[in-house]
Amino acid sequence: MDKTIKNGDCILRFENVTKRFPGVLALDSVSFDVLKGEVHALVGENGAGKSTLIKIVTGVYQKTSGNILFQGIPIDYQNPHEALRNGVAAIYQELNLIPALTVAENIFMGHHFKNERGFVDWKKIKEEAQKLIDFLEVDVDVDAKVGTLGVAKKQVVEIAKALSLNAQVLIMDEPTAALAKKEIETLFRIIRFLKTQGVTIIYISHHLDEIFAIADRVTVLRDGKHVSTNTTSALSIDDLIRKMVGRKLTEQFPYMNHQSKDEILHVENLNRNGILHDISFSLKKGQIVGLAGMVGSGRTELLRAIYGLDPIDSGKIFVKGQEVKIQSPQDAINLGIALLPEERKTQGLVLLLSVIDNIGLPSLTKISTRGFINDKELNRITAEMVQMMNIKTPSFDQKVMFLSGGNQQKVVLGKWFARECDIYLFDEPTRGIDVGAKVEIYHLMNKLIERGAAILMVSSELPEILGMSDQILVMKEGRITGQLSRQNANQEEVLKLAIGGGHLSGRSD
């Protein structure tokens, strides 16, 4: 391939790229250019076609029609290894590393240096790995087992691995999803440095503030179609949102105040093995209580304890005024408590099952007689939930693994809505979901509130906590450090209680 291409020249061109799956047009004649040495953001709602496009570029999928030109030459990679050998690499949220191997071994896995006798030259591998790590100016031990590293350092290893194969286009898919603020700053420094070396970055993120902080240009996809490609300097966040969703989101947080005086959940002096300390609070019908705090503050652990996933050492839980013993999730479900876990793919859904099967799971005992499922009632419930939740699926029989992240989350919500629970424990309900789907989730939360249910919500996004909560509990090191009303809450006060000043970092517990 021509290696003389200069910064600013077109390095990757999409010409009418189309991809059809059975019953779904995922990409519809998408055309745009990516320039050498730029950070090119790719944004859109879940299901817009972003993931499909990058999987075609990297050989995971084959396009139905159209052309992709890399440095002016048509490409049609058949697998990711072929793409990587030719200079196109992707770093996904689920990092492709082997935990039991060292950093150096992971970087040069599959393309080892050999000595004169034809054996693997481990000394050379270590030396070259160290050069790459030094090149990126990060503190990573090349002899360390990858399994011992945090997410941020694992990402550095993935980047070094791509550079070891002279990657000229580096695709980053939601790279900051599990990073704290300082780690994000380090990543951005590396990205800016790679730009100076002529590496092209395609950056995919739902966090629009990141797009404006790091990207030179941004391409918007909507419903599988190319909407626009602009310099970020020519756009505002409102402009970008409008392009992504096809409408102006005038009310990002549709708050409703429907709370009653009736207490539905009361937690008293809850303790768990040095993790939770004397937790006490109340939740009323029609109320949303937000749980704010830093990574490791104990927010997720509190939800897990209430739901019976983790044992408690002492303390009391009351539901509708009655003291209860919750020793398992089934106990919680029987009491009308539902959990929307942070990891919806591994904990909230059975990915290999269909939409109808996932929605029906919590309600099987209600719609079964003598062990036989009432198929008519199951179909009725599913149809109602799909319509109410606006779940975009070609059929009820579609496996949920093929749905977008936002639609997967709506399936999780739908299955518990159908169960008609009283108390909802939400753990990062909009994590990894685009702005349009977020607003839909907020409206669905309001539907629950209108019905008299109550929500205890963990979120690491302060605007979400402030925008949707009637009351905010702030946690630090397993303790509730403060309680704020909606009227008295602001970002500064929450941060003060969470960390005593500074920045609320991280996206999950």
Image (spheres, rainbow, N blue to C red):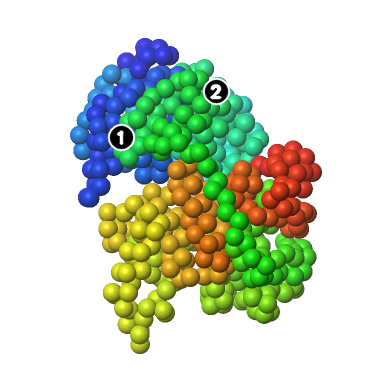
Callout 2 crowding tier (Cα within 10 Å): few <14, some 14–19, many ≥20: some
Residue 325: name its quadrant: bottom right
In the rendered structure, the answer to whether residue 368 lies left or right of residue 184 reads: left
Residue 225 - label: 1
Q: Position of residue 427 (x, y in %)?
A: 57, 56
Residue 399: name its quadrant: bottom left
Q: Position of residue 133 (x, y in %)?
A: 57, 30
Residue 481 visible here: yes
Instruction: Residue at 74%, 73% (x, y): give it.
Output: 315
Give the residue type that dot 1 points to. Answer: Lys
Residue 192 - label: 2
Element marked by disc 2: helix
Instruction: Residue at 57%, 54% (x, y): give it.
Output: 256
Q: Position of residue 262 (x, y in %)?
A: 66, 70
In the rendered structure, the answer to whether residue 9 lies left or right of residue 213 reads: left
Instruction: Residue at 56%, 67% (x, y): give it.
Output: 452
Instruction: Residue at 42%, 74% (x, y): give it.
Output: 363
92 over 6 or under it: above or below? below
Give the residue type that dot 2 points to. Answer: Arg
Element marked by disc 1: strand
367 over 55 or under it: above or below? below
User: Which quarter of the rendering shows the N terminus?
Assistant: top left
Residue 506: name its quadrant: top right
